[in-house]
C-alpha cells in the first residue's frame, strides 16, 4: 500500500470528517479533531502543514485505523479513492 503524497493537514482533516472526526480546537498550525465511536472518545492532532511529512501522515492514519477497527490499507482506500 502506497500512501498518497502531497496531502496537507487541512485536506486530511476534511477527509477524516467523513469518519466522524470534528475539529474541537486549534492552536497555531495544529488542529485537534475528536470522534466518539462505539462510546469511546478518540482525539488526534493534525499539523496543518503543506504537505504533511510521510511519517506523520502514516502515524495519524495508523492511529485512526486502529480506533475504527479497520486495516490501514482499507482506511486509505476509503479516504482517498475517488
Image (spheres, grey):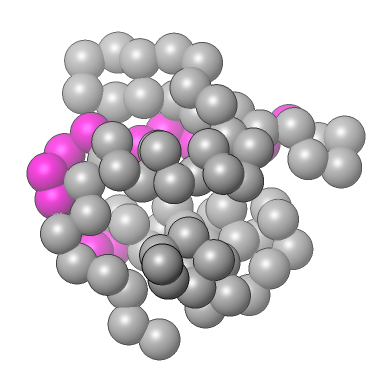
Instruction: Identify which residue is drawn at 27% across, 70% down.
Output: 4
The answer to whether one can see residue 72 in this image is: no
Q: Is residue 50 a member of the stretch shown in magenta?
A: yes
Quarter holding the C terminus? bottom left
Query: Which of the two residues, 77 or 65, is positioned nearer the viewer here?
Result: 77
Q: Is residue 27 left or right of residue 44?
A: left
Q: How many marks?
A: 0
Quarter holding the N terminus? bottom left
The answer to whether one can see residue 62 in this image is: yes
Q: Is residue 77 a member of the stretch shown in magenta?
A: no
Q: Looking at the picture, does residue 75 appear above or below residue 46? A: below
Give how far across and how far down residue 51 sits, in percent: 14, 50
Q: Is residue 66 left or right of residue 55?
A: right
Q: Residue furthest right?
A: 39
Instruction: Identify which residue is drawn at 64% across, 37% down.
Output: 20
Give how far across and how far down residue 11 sits, in percent: 30, 43
Q: Is residue 66 left or right of residue 17?
A: right
Give how far across and how far down residue 68 sits, in percent: 70, 56
Give how far across and how far down residue 79 sits, in percent: 48, 60
Q: Looking at the picture, does residue 65 appear above or below residue 4? A: above
Q: Which residues are magenta?
A: 41-55
Amino acid at each position: 500500500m502506497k500512501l498518497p503524497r502531497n496531502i496537507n493537514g487541512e485536506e486530511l482533516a476534511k477527509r477524516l470528517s467523513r469518519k466522524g472526526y470534528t475539529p474541537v480546537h486549534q492552536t497555531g498550525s495544529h488542529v485537534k479533531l475528536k470522534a466518539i465511536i462505539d462510546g469511546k472518545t478518540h482525539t488526534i492532532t493534525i499539523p496543518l502543514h503543506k504537505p504533511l511529512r510521510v511519517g506523520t501522515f502514516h502515524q495519524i492514519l495508523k492511529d485512526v485505523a486502529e480506533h475504527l477497527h479497520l486495516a490501514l490499507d482499507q482506511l486509505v482506500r476509503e479516504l482517498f479513492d475517488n
